[in-house]
Amino acid sequence: MTDPELADRIEIDDLLTRYATAVDTRDWDLYKSVFTADAVIDYTSSGGIRGKLAEVTEWLSDALSGFSMSQHMVTNRDIRVTGDAATSRSYFYNPMGRTKRDGTLALMFVGGYYRDRLRRTDAGWRIVERIQDTAWLSTSPGTPGDRPG
């Protein structure tokens, strides 16, 4: 692997981490910075929507407003770079919680995969298409069984 190839992989790895940070901190400007302006994002496997960046950002913001915490982890990243294009398949593990009246958390755990197509832009690597493949969902006792975004 050459130095430029390694630098691309590190930048893409940082981008995938920035996605998780943006979602968990509800920083929607940071979230939008992960994607190209024409990106398509597909959360249908978890009951969400598929659409362009602006509409998905609005939907995700609303969908996550009912959760008092989330902690996305993006791991096992398989990144393939070919020139100014790349693909990535990574695992996600996402505990999410709603604060109950007694102050404790009702937890939901979601796991699956992100399949991404990426493009090098003047601002660096960005996701052009993200498809979330939800593999499983588990809730703690007393947690509503609805599906997250």
Image: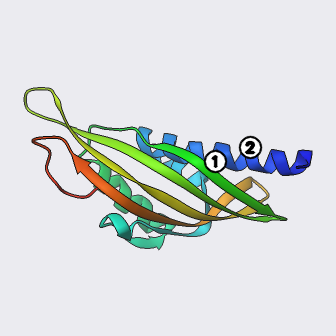
Q: Residue shown at 28%/54% (left/top)?
A: 137
Residue 26 visible to the viewer: no
Q: Position of residue 48 (x, y in %)?
A: 33, 66
Depicted 142 relative to depicted 137: above or below: above
Label number found at residue 15? 1
Name the residue type under label 2: Ile
Label number found at residue 112? none
Mark nearer the viewer, 1 or 2: 2
Name the residue type under label 1: Leu
Q: Position of residue 101 (x, y in %)?
A: 8, 32
Q: Nearer the viewer, residue 70 or 34?
A: 70
Q: Position of residue 9 (x, y in %)?
A: 75, 49
Q: Residue furthest right?
A: 2
Q: Residue shown at 88%/49% (left/top)?
A: 1
Residue on which disc 2 sits: 10
Depicted 48 relative to depicted 11: above or below: below
Q: Secondary structure at mark 2?
A: helix
Q: Residue shown at 28%/48% (left/top)?
A: 65
Q: Would residue 51 appear left or right of 34 to someone viewing this image?
A: left
CA–CA distance in space, label 1 to label 2? 9 Å
Q: Nearer the viewer, residue 57 or 23?
A: 23
Q: Quadrant of residue 88?
A: bottom right
